[in-house]
Image: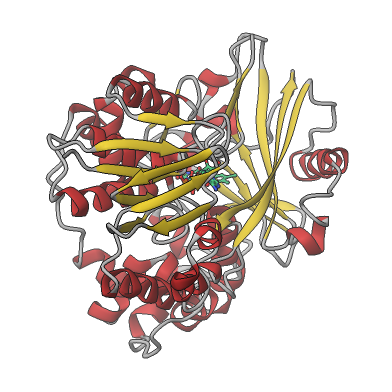
């Protein structure tokens, strides 16, 4: 009899898991359970009538590495190649990234001459941090917070300013709490295997991946730093949804998973609001804490590990200005926590993707990111915070940092509660304990998605592919 696999959660991880299941030669029956009325999870774009696009979640996908190539392959397979908006290596959005420190925007060095000169806000040439790194002995800790790791190897200033800002941009998190081992596993391993991160990254290059396509080759030749889709990132879940429907995947919208139980025959009985569903295997692409709450009481040791994986909230304010210019051109700027803890940074969307500005005449689209690990102390309770106050805060930052004081002609405010999981010190122990519980009990349950081993869209898709490959023995 054909096996049934239930996939929990219709974010990009659950969609990707369903996609890999549905396209396998031994495709099982696939049931996708999503609590809301639409798919995509945090991937969410607004398209206006005049053709402008505003991203409320991810806006740029990196093509690099095995996981980046894997996503580009999926994009081609879904027929989205013609929709891709690349940002080539020589584009200002690839070369220019800024930090806002002490009232000024500072461009981060993007070439060797920038490393040998003193470039503010740093007090000495960054090459000294590199030399320190090469001289520093290998660390002995099983895990270390990112700030401590970088301070030990590269020095205090790089940790306080650059890495602090980077972690706010990527994880909306505090580098003093986040784990080096789990957030930057390749760099952590490079130190372990080559004694130095720089040497490890130079000589321990990632093995070439056996995936290839014209799109992957183009991305490499043009040295893309990132890409998006013409109609916004939302086009990706839309294309996946269409594909799954064509392949006969049963998609249940408005179907929150409430409770999981094992039947006497060893399958799962899944309680949803209007009944139950049975499946031989479950792939959970839910946030870890949500899955923990649905587990049976005998799985309490697993639930405990999952409950330890917390996420932070982010307020995303999209602003569209007419007839104004930016003082600098580039991807955007980040703000270190000592400068303004609840203001994470501003993305200059119009620079990277002018195709999404719409037909309304010259303008500037910006996204202000607020909150993260500093949400509650800086902005208040994410459930209660006033959207008007968030908008004022974002506009004030745009005025102060970029000198734009006119009213935006469009503004959208979203508060994403618990949207970015935080891999804090010791995260790896929760993952290992969860995995060993599943293995010891031989439970037909796979864990995929942003809660575990990578928060980027690429990581989420790759985690789904790996889980399906393990379940079916291969992925075509
Ligand atoms: P989710 O998107 O959280 O999906 C989980 C799904 O499960 C949701 O659809 C939810 O409705 C559903 N669900 C919840 N409870 C239940 C239940 N009980 N039963 C059934 N379904 C349920 N990544 C990048 O690569 N580049 C970027 O530029 C980038 N920017 C980002 C900006 C923001 C503001 C955010 C929030 C994230 C960003 N990310 C970025 C990260 C990336 O977008 C996310 O990590 C990724 O989309 C998470 O996908 P997921 O499917 O694992 O989880």
Q: Is residue 308 left or right of residue 341?
A: left
Q: Which residue is painted at 67% across and 10% down in the image?
A: 360
Q: Is residue 447 left or right of residue 22?
A: right
Picture residue at 66% right of the left edge, 61% below the top: 336
Q: Is residue 96 left or right of residue 279?
A: right
Of 91 and 286, nearer the camera is 286
Q: Which quadrant: the N terminus?
A: top left
Q: Residue furthest front?
A: 264
Q: Position of residue 351 (x, y in %)?
A: 55, 30
Query: Does residue 21 lie above or below 157 as drawn?
Result: above
Quarter placement of the C terminus: top left
Q: Is residue 90 left or right of residue 377?
A: left
Specify the quadrant of the image occupied by residue 147.
Answer: bottom right
**Is residue 283 visible from the viewing direction of this image?**
yes
Could you say which quadrant of the image residue 341 lies in?
bottom right
Q: Position of residue 20 (x, y in %)?
A: 25, 38
Residue 119 seen in the figure: no
Q: Nearer the viewer, residue 417 or 353?
A: 417
């Amino acid at each position: 009899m054909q096996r049934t696999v239930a996939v929990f959660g219709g974010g990009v991880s659950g969609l990707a898991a369903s996609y890999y299941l549905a396209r396998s030669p031994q495709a099982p029956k696939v049931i996708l359970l999503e609590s809301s009325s639409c798919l995509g999870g945090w991937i969410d774009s607004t398209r206006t009538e005049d053709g402008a696009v505003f991203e409320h979640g991810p806006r740029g996908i990196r093509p690099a590495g095995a996981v980046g190539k894997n996503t580009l392959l999926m994009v081609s397979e879904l027929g989205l190649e013609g929709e891709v908006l690349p940002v080539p290596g020589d584009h200002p959005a690839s070369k220019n990234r800024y930090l806002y420190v002490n009232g000024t925007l500072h461009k981060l060095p993007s070439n060797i001459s920038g490393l040998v000169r003193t470039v503010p806000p740093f007090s000495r040439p960054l090459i000294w941090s590199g030399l320190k790194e090469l001289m520093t002995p290998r660390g002995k800790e099983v895990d270390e917070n990112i700030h401590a790791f970088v301070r030990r190897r590269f020095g205090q200033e790089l940790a306080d300013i650059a890495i602090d800002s980077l972690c706010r941009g990527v994880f909306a998190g505090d580098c003093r709490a986040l784990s080096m081992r789990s957030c930057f596993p390749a760099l952590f391993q490079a130190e372990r295997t080559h004694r130095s991160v720089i040497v490890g990254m130079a000589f321990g290059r990632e093995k070439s991946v056996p995936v290839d396509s014209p799109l992957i080759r183009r991305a490499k030749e043009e040295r893309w730093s990132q890409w998006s889709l013409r109609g916004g990132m939302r086009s990706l879940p839309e294309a996946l949804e269409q594909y799954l429907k064509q392949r006969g995947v049963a998609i249940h919208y408005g179907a929150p998973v409430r409770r999981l139980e094992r039947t006497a025959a060893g399958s799962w009985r899944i309680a949803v609001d209007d009944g139950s569903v049975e499946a031989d295997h479950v792939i959970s692409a839910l946030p870890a804490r949500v899955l923990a709450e649905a587990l049976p009481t005998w799985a309490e040791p697993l639930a405990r590990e999952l409950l330890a994986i917390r996420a932070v909230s982010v307020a995303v304010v999209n602003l569209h200005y007419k007839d104004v210019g930016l003082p600098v051109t580039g991807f955007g700027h980040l703000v270190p926590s000592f400068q303004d803890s609840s203001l994470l940074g501003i993305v200059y969307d119009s620079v990277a993707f002018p195709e999404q500005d719409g037909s309304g005449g010259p303008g500037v689209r910006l996204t202000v990111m607020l909150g993260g690990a500093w949400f509650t102390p800086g902005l208040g309770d994410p459930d209660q915070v006033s959207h008007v106050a968030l908008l004022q805060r974002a506009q004030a930052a745009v005025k102060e940092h970029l000198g734009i004081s006119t009213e935006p002609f469009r503004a959208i405010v979203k508060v994403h509660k618990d949207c970015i999981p935080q891999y804090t010190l010791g995260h790896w122990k929760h993952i290992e304990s969860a995995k060993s519980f599943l293995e010891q009990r031989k439970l037909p349950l796979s864990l995929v998605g942003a809660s575990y081993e990578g928060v980027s869209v690429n990581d989420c898709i790759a985690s789904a592919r790996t889980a399906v490959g393990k379940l079916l023995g291969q992925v075509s």
